Image (cartoon, grey):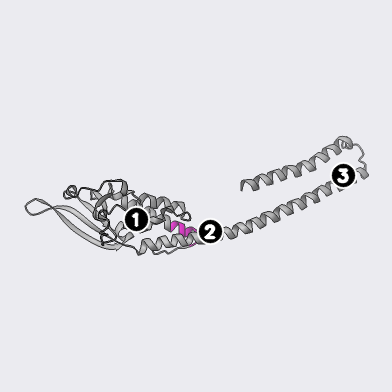
Amino acid sequence: MKKIKLTLIISCFLIGLSLIVPLLFWIKDYFISIESPINSTILSEFASFQGLIIAFWSLIINFILVLLAYKAFKNFDVKKQFHNKQLEIVSELSTSISSMEISNMMYKMTPDPSGKQHQIITGFTFSFFEIALGFDYSKFDIICVRGKNIEKTFPFLKFKNHPLLPKTISDELKKLYRPLQYFFSVNKEDLKTKNYVLLYHDKKVDTDDITTAWTYEFYKTPSDFSKDVVSLRKSIIEWYEEYGADNLNI
């Protein structure tokens, strides 16, 4: 775009220069004052010369416009293919999120009739957005996940670095990504006295990897989890709406 602007500026400058310079010479040599007689022959030659310059620049401008139109046509086709591919990736991501079922086990300290605190456990299995947005996690101390590979809990996070994924959506996915392999697992004894949520996707434990049964801290501030998921959902919907898609079931 900068090259096109620079080309137009230079072209306008050269056109103006080619028209003004002959006019200045004509005024200098033949046009003394308004009252002075003007040689019609010289004026006619000057007008013919100016007409030749205008015709020359008209030809050049038309040639430039044809090149720009051809380039715009080629770019339009490339952009169309790019957006189609990008739409496929976003649709694949949306389908992966919407179709994925995830479970939440909520451990909450509750006093019994004698006043002694016990953990009461409740759990549900719904789609990702229903689990993330359908519960109030602000009353819990932390949110945990099972296993150190966060992409096993949330498989759709594999899209976060896809080159065709819109950056606005990629940035939201990266908020959910936690490199758990670089952290220590949570001591289960410490969890026995806390209000916490355990999120897990695959109930099957890989016997070849003992870390799949370990518990890792996912969000220190549980309410931030819901906020980040809201932002992710909003970014996907806004991207679709920008390209004319609406009434989405996300």
The reply to whether dot 1 and dot 2 touch (C-beta < 8 Å) is no
- x, y percent for residue 61: 73, 51
Crowding near pointer 3: few (<14 within 10 Å), some, many (20+)?
some
Q: Residue at 93% of width from left, 45% of height from top?
A: 41
**Residue type of the residue flagged with mark 3:** Phe
Quarter occupied by the C terminus: bottom left
Q: Is residue 60 above or below residue 94?
A: above
Residue 241 inside the magenta-drawn segment: yes
Residue at 81% over, 39% down: 21
Task: Tell me whether circle 3 and circle 1 mark residues in contact (CB < 8 Å).
Answer: no
Vertical placement of residue 21 versus 86, above or below: above
Q: Nearer the viewer, residue 78 or 16?
A: 78
Q: Is residue 161 left or right of residue 218?
A: right
Other residues around mark 1 within 10 Å, as few (<14) / some (14–19) / many (≥20)? some
Whether the magenta-drawn stretch holds residue 99 is answered as: no
User: Mark 1 or mark 2: which is in front?
Assistant: 1
Residue 202 screen position, x and y as percent: 28, 61
Q: Residue at x 45, y 63 (%)?
A: 246
The secondary structure type at the circle numbered 1 is helix
Q: Which residues are magenta?
A: 237-244
Residue at numbered disc 3:
46
Task: Tell me the SS state at disc 3.
Answer: helix
Residue that badge 1 annotates: 151
Judge left or right: residue 19 versus residue 1: right
Amino acid carrying label 2: it is Phe
